[in-house]
Amino acid sequence: MASVVRVGEQFPAAPAPLPWRQQAWAEKLPESIERGADHLISLQAQEGYWVGELEADSTLESDYIYYLHILGKADPVRIAKLANYVRRKQLSDGGWNIYPGGPSELNATCKAYFALKLAGDSPDSPHLAKAREMIHRLGGLERTNSYVRFYLALVGAVGWNLVPSIPPEMMLLPNWFAMNIYEMSSWTRGIVIPMAILSSLRPDWRVPESAHVEELFKNPSHKTAAFDWSDKFISWKNFFLALDRGFKLYEKSPWKPLRQRALREAKGWMLQHMERSEGVAAIYPAMMNSIFALIALGHGPEDPLTWREINEFSKFEIEEQDTIRLQPCVSPVWDTCIAMVALQEAGVEPDHPSLVKAADWILSKQILGGGDWQVKNKDAEPGGWAFEFRNDHYPDVDDTAFILMALQRVKFPDEARMKAATRRAVQWLISMQNRDGGWAAFDRDNDSKFLCNIPFADHNAMIDPSTADVTARVMECLGRFGWPAEHPAMQRGLKFLLKDQCEDGSWFGRWGVNYVYGTSGVLRALETVSLHTKDYCKRAANWLKSVQKPDGSFGESLRSYDDPKTKGQGASTPSQTAWGLIGLMAAADPGDPAIASAAEYLVRQQNNDGSWSESEFTGTGFPCVFYLKYHLYRNSFPVYALARFYNQSRRSEEFRAFLFQPEEFRLRSGF
């Protein structure tokens, strides 16, 4: 036992500070965090929320040119601005990509080519001639996905024989049937049900002959072949292709006894989902398709019902001097909870007006009515949050978990209101756990993989199964609310995560790019429930260190979704470096140089106004098909990561110093 401390006696020398403390950038760290937090606060809307631009690829602008022609609202000035934006996204090889730095992609290039022809560009112009060459090089129009073909068929540019059948009779299938609409993901329902109406009615919307695209077929003999059959004779793909052939024969038949009833069901579903929402599913393809379906059903653009949807859809436009670009949706709830957590970690007081106002706004957005999730989760009370301003049919698990973490540390004046909202949300979150132990985004047990072989499932997101990143978010949230790792729900979640872990220790990221995002989220969750010292976490931390760049940064291209061999490789970004840092802090030794190196990179890359710059897309819509750039990610996550690094390092140094003190002093100090 150490001797009793006497007056004037010197304590043993404390250990040296962590090595990074001696470096010049360390002096800038507190100021960097403060400037980042101030910048975030400056971006807050008057109402209390944050919302950054949600950027996607040029297919949205291409589709919008097409959409305005169908509406009869192809104002030359607006079309010219949209066309300007599309032209500027063309690559030097003639094609268009679906993410910055990515290769030319067939579907995006075909959409751009068609849109620019609609806008008046000549097919003989150098840029379209070059685009046509690239389309042939990529396989031709016959290799495009079902959605490209569908939109072309709607205006007579290709035949319906090239389009997968989407019979509205699917609306009549009972919920217990293996192929009913609620076995599809929520976003697929929103996209496909209006398409089923259009597929049945086949309105006579024609574009000028000059806009037709027959020249895009690489092989003219493929104009009648929709999709290739699988080499494996007995397969789900061949089953659904045979079924598609049958549906095409059915469409030609004059006898369709259930058609009118099916159309009424589809229209009723669509109208129901327009209520308590900014539009069907509050996302671009579903909203555009629903407007088309309303027009086909006889509700013209000036009809109050259609006009409301058109007005909501127009809010996605961002108009600048000579361009118009489109967002696929808006993300205020998601952006707000991330900003709140970042500010809290940065030391903003729990009763700061910015946090209180944000919490008040968030509480007003809690969804207390029913939604599609109840089809498979009948007994739970509502209580989640959606991603957008209003999308009451589709609260999602990821948002709800992050929001609960954001609200937990706010000192809200109406404590009873906060407790009631939190209790309801936690109960809803738990009720959404899947039978495999994980959590998905919008539905429970939406994991019928055989449906991914349906011809119109080529958007690569037909189902909504459990994912590591969403499961980790829920487990982190529950851990923060005091749920121990031993709880049965947490144990089931852990079992799913361990089964989902890659051999190299990483985790796949479904909603963020990609393995860096997934791995970071899981490590942070397991740290919260004190599992971060386990071997599986050490392997994950070692994987993160193996892909960290010499300058301390992290960067992973969207190529990793197509080619896992490229995982962890790509241009450095602030958001991904923040994720890498968060993951390392969760599972690596606090003194590991890799941690300080990532923090140093973020400090050095910060702009004078407290922001960070980022050109890459680090968000995921549909893997391999549709990607996103959240414009606030580059600011919120670095603030959170740096603040967490600073707080963790300070606690680590205090604890190391404490270990060197005499025992009596340790007892008196309260450790």
Image (spheres, rainbow, N blue to C red):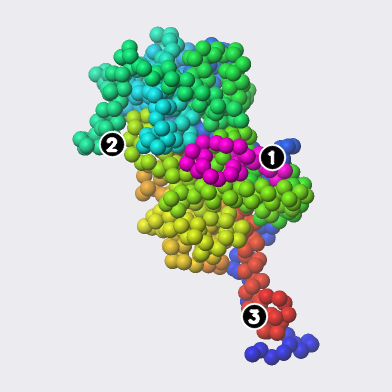
Judging by the rendered image, the residue that carries numbered circle 1 is 364
Cα–Cα span, label 1 and label 2? 45 Å
Q: Is residue 605 visible?
A: no
Under circle 2, the secondary element is helix
- Estimate how packed mark 3 is, as few (under 14), some (14 to 19) or many (20 or more) residues with alpha carbons within 10 Å: some
**In the visual, does 463 lie left or right of 310?**
left
Residue 236 is marked as: 2
In this rendering, the label closer to the viewer, 3 or 1: 1
Image spot of residue 24 (x, y percent):
64, 61
Task: Locate residue 476, reporting x and y percent.
Answer: 56, 56
* Identity of the residue furthest to the top in this view: 209
What residue is shown at x 50% (from left), y 57% (from top)?
A: 489
Dot 3 corresponds to which residue? 660
Checking the image for residue 570, the label placed there is: none
Q: Quadrant of residue 105?
A: top left
Q: Which quadrant, please, contains the N terminus?
A: bottom right
